[in-house]
Amino acid sequence: METARPALAGWTIETGASKLTRSFKFESFTQAFGFMAQVALLAEKAGHHPDWSNSYNKVEITLSTHDAGGLTQKDVDLAQKISALV
Ligand SMILES: C[C@H](O)[C@H](O)[C@H]1CNC2=NC(N)=NC(=O)C2=N1
């Protein structure tokens, strides 16, 4: 596990598992869910979707390319678009 380079600041690259992860915390469930709605629109537009979980004001996101069995540029691109939302 290593901290991502600046272009992916905030994301953790799980080298063994070949995935990107990041936790987001908001002030309320409503804000967390609003963020998820924005991510959902980005994901649908990209045709690339996060694995994620939500608990009240926290959203945990994992990005990997299932078809490729690991990380691809699609994950990096989506991570950067998600980061730009917060
Ligand atoms: C057919 C469709 O494009 C594929 O199933 C897409 C959809 N979204 C996806 N999302 C992610 N994270 N990985 C994929 O391999 C993937 N494949």
Image: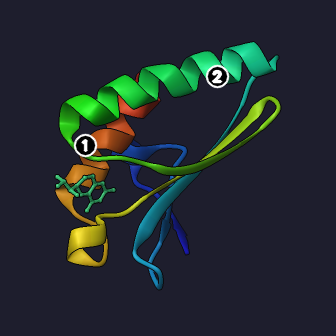
Residue 20 point in image, percent of width and height: 45, 60
Q: Is 73 placed above or below 28 here?
A: below
Q: Is 82 placed above or below 73 here?
A: above
Residue 60 point in image, percent of width and height: 64, 47
Quarter of the image for residue 70 reads: bottom left
Look at discs 2 and 1 and give the one toward the viewer.
2
**Dot 1 amino acid type:** Asp
On screen, residue 77 versus residue 60, left or right, reads left
How much space separates mark 2 and mark 1, taking CA atoms? 22 Å
Q: Is 49 placed above or below 38 here?
A: below
Residue shown at the point (45%, 31%) measured from the top left: 83
Q: Quadrant of the N terminus?
A: bottom right
Residue 6 point in image, percent of width and height: 40, 44
Residue shown at the point (47%, 43%) measured from the top left: 9
**Dot 2 amino acid type:** Phe
Residue shown at the point (50%, 21%) measured from the top left: 37
Residue 22 point in image, percent of width and height: 58, 49
Give SS at disc 1. Answer: helix
Q: Is 85 placed above or below 49 here?
A: above
Ligand 1 appears in which quadrant?
Answer: bottom left
Classify 10 Å Cα crowding around label 1: few (below 14), some (14-19), many (20 and above): some
Please tell me the numbered disc located at residue 77: 1
On screen, residue 20 versus residue 64, left or right, reads right
Disc 2 target residue: 33
Give SS at disc 2. Answer: helix
2 or 1: tag closer to the N-terminus: 2
Residue shown at the point (47%, 80%) measured from the top left: 17
Res 38 seen here: yes
Res 85 seen here: no
